[in-house]
Amino acid sequence: MAQIKTEEAYRAALKRVEYLEDLVTDDTPANDQYALELDMLIDLIEEYEDIHYPIGKPSLTDIIKLRMYEMGISQKAIAAMLGISEPRMSEIMHGKTEPSLSLARSISKKLNIDANIVLGV
């Protein structure tokens, strides 16, 4: 199967997808030439992006920061919610220490963060 091999080809494919998205609607038959081209280009773009723009797993710190933003609360408030000191929370947020198993459980439950993420699985 074909591949996108250069950044120029990648950018051209992105432009073509933008054009095709205007032509293909929810009512467009799956065997329509534009719908088929769009599907193929999307697959090629995803393959190129997986190689050249990989997205790593988020760290626990990243997830906690996101949750703080979503909840509109500070690191101090998170520490209070988890029942730990601000310096301990700071150490966790700066990657200087890992949470204990009981604290990891609390982070998972109280911040609604998947246990696998908290445990780094």
Image (tube, rainbow, N blue to C red):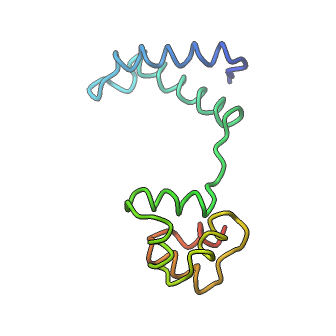
- Image mark count: 0
Q: Where's residue 115, x and y in %?
A: 55, 73
Residue 95: where, in percent of width, then height? 70, 65
User: Left of 108 or right of it: where is 19?
Assistant: left
**Residue with the most extreme left position:** 27
Quarter placement of the C terminus: bottom right
Residue 54 in view, yes or no: yes
Q: Is residue 108 left or right of residue 6?
A: left
Residue drawn at (59%, 16%) of the image: 11
Quadrant of the rendered image containing residue 43: top right
Work out whether residue 121 can be spotted: no
Residue at x-position 30% and y-position 24%: 25
At 64% from the left and 54% from the top, the residue drawn is: 57
Q: Is residue 39 left or right of residue 88?
A: left
Where is residue 82 drawn, in percent x and y?
Answer: 49, 80
Q: Quadrant of residue 68?
A: bottom left
Q: Quadrant of the N terminus?
A: top right
Residue that protrudes farthest toward the bottom in the picture: 102
Residue 10 x %, y %: 62, 19
Q: Is residue 53 above or below residue 37?
A: below
- Placement of 49 over or under 88, stated as above or below: above
Compare residues 36 and 111 and report the one nearer the observer. 111
Residue closer to the observer: 35 or 98:
98
Residue 84 picture quarter: bottom right
Say which residue appears at 34% left-offset and 17% top-offset.
Answer: 22
Most foreground residue, 87 or 104:
87
